[in-house]
Image: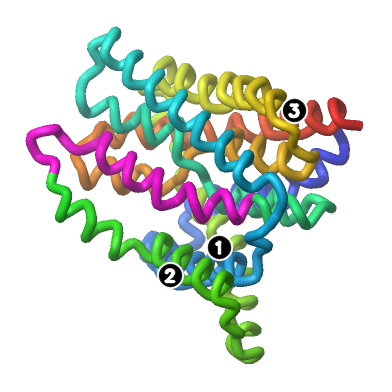
Amino acid sequence: MLQMINILFSPIALIALGFYLFQSRTLDEKFWNGAEKLNYYVLFPSLLFSSLASANMHMGHLDSILMVIFAMMAIIIVSTYLFAKLNKSPDEYFGVYIQSLIRFNTYIGLSIATTLPNPEIKSILVNILAIAIPFVNVVSILSLTPKNQLNIKNIAISLIKNPLINSCILGIAFNLLEIPIWTGFQSLLQAFSSSSLMLGLLCVGTAIQFKGIQAYFKTAFIISFARLCIIPIVTFIVLQVFNLNYAAVVAIMIFFSIPTASASYILTKLLNGDYQLMAAVISLQTILSVVTLAIMLALVQSYYF
């Protein structure tokens, strides 16, 4: 467990610092708005592009890894849809449920994967993210859009404009076509990438809202428990069917154990979902994941060693 605490200390400390700086008003709110935009449009796309451009796309068991990812995604989406129908949940709740359970905080995931001693874990996780980012964006938009307002053209345009999706596609293209990247530009990308994780984790801290947690505690806790406990357990059971190595198992478990993305709040508000509930879920998941991630990583390690 001590090793897990060492691994998680850096992302936890940065999130806590971001929370403190935001709540104490040490830095103006305009700074955080600018920081989030800088990270979303420049720094994080650079991290995704550079990671994918140099990633091992021909790793063994990649087909099995993706099979697990999409099998779990299908289970989550169908289960969420049935739950919402049976409980007659309001339409503005459904998009919150979906995003809370299938979206992921890439800053936390990559930060943990980078800290782990096995570099193969980060390589596998980056490949998973490349496939998952476009998929979860489509599903998230669809879940928040009323049936009578579905417009394929508008959805397609919003996806084409998404800098994360574009950087993934570009990175994969450079990798598969073996296009060399100039050393000077590679150094710049590395600087952007290093800044992205740090700034991203600080911004995650600004999304924590204790007032929202108090107002929606019961619903937010049920959703968070499903995301951080039930889904990882089901994932681990599903993984037993596949003959995957330790690095692949850890990468997949990190992917399904990290909290939902802070950006879920913005999308929910733009598409008229219950953004206050979404804020409460993001906050609670981020706080609880400090404990659940440590337990999950420790259990996986004890199972294999």
Which residue position holds label 1? 199
Magenta residues (range)? 125-150
Q: Check disc 2 and give the amino acid type.
A: Leu
Q: Cα distance, mark 1 to mark 2?
A: 9 Å
Q: Check disc 3 and give the amino acid type.
A: Ile
N-terminal label among 3 and 2: 2
Q: Is residue 145 left or right of residue 62?
A: left
Q: Is residue 4 left or right of residue 82?
A: right
Q: Please give the name of the residue rendered at 68% of the width and 24% of the height, measured from the top-left corner.
A: 241
**Is residue 28 among the parts visible in the rendering?**
no
Q: Considering the numbered disc 3 on the image, is that residue within a helix, a strand or a loop?
A: helix
Based on the picture, tell me whether residue 90 belongs to the magenta stretch: no
Based on the picture, tell me whether residue 147 belongs to the magenta stretch: yes
Q: Quadrant of the N terminus?
A: top right
Q: Is residue 173 left or right of residue 79?
A: right
Q: In this view, does 262 lie above or below 221?
A: below
Q: Is residue 97 above or below residue 127?
A: above
Tag 1 near tag 2, CB within 8 Å: yes
Q: Residue 167: where, in percent of width, then height?
A: 45, 68
Q: Residue 109: where, in percent of width, then height?
A: 62, 47
N-terminal label among 1 and 2: 2
Which residue position holds label 2? 38
